[in-house]
Image (cartoon, rainbow, N blue to C red):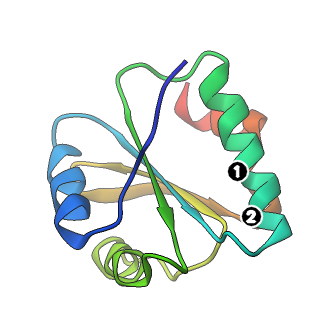
Amino acid sequence: MAQYRELDSIEQWNEALEGSANRPLVVFKHSTTCPVSANAHREFQEYLNDKPREDADYVFVKVIESRPVSNQIAEDTAVTHASPQIMLVQNKEKVWTASHWSITKEHITAVLD
């Protein structure tokens, strides 16, 4: 089972983004007030609880509570903000993203594994 760490500062995001030069980074952006996001979060957790990719780092951002971090991620990856949203970042660049009902354990597994 893989664990994610929550990012709540731009400094933490910058560190995670820099780390993507060495290890793939999976970013999950979550709205704590949205039922669609709650479903996507369950799907993400199911992926992490099964057989997640072991060579990747996983981070989690609450978009309402950490709006500046969420906005910085959108700017740095050139991915228009959505929530829920998941993305794979490698070498400091977005290589895949999905949002809303497209975030399923099966979809995440197909892309990451």
Crowd rating for badge 2 (residues with CA inside 10 Å; few <14, some 14–19, many 20+): many
Q: Residue farthest to the front?
A: 65
Residue 8 position within the rendered picture, expressed as x and y whole percent measured from the top left: 35, 66
Characterize the local packing of mark 1: few (<14), some (14-19) or many (20 or more) Cα atoms within 10 angstroms. Answer: many
Q: Residue at x 74, y 64 (%)?
A: 37
Question: Is 79 placed left or right of 16 in the picture?
Answer: right
The image shows residue 31, relative to residue 89, as above or below, that is below
* Picture residue at 29% right of the left edge, 59% below the top: 93
Give the side of residue 93 with respect to residue 31, left or right: left
> How far from the left and from the top, in percent, is residue 6?
41, 52
Q: Amino acid at mark 1?
A: His
Pick the residue in front: 110 or 5: 5
Quarter of the picture containing the N terminus is top right
The reply to whether discs 2 and 1 touch (Cβ–Cβ < 8 Å) is yes
**Residue beneath the point at 64% across and 73% down:** 83
Determine which quarter of the picture holds residue 32: bottom right
Q: Position of residue 101 (x, y in %)?
A: 82, 60
Q: Nearer the viewer, residue 91 or 9?
A: 9
> Looking at the image, which residue is at 27% across and 69% down?
9
Q: Which mark is residue 37?
A: 2
Report the residue marked by disc 1: 41
- For label 2, the SS is helix
Indicate the quadrant containing the C terminus: top left, top right, bottom left or bottom right: top right
Q: Is residue 47 above or below residue 87?
A: above
Q: Secondary structure at mark 1?
A: helix
In the image: residue 36, left or right of residue 95: right
Which quadrant of the structure image shows residue 97?
Answer: bottom right
Say above or below: 103 vs 68. Answer: above
Between the C-alphas of marks 2 and 1, the distance is 6 Å
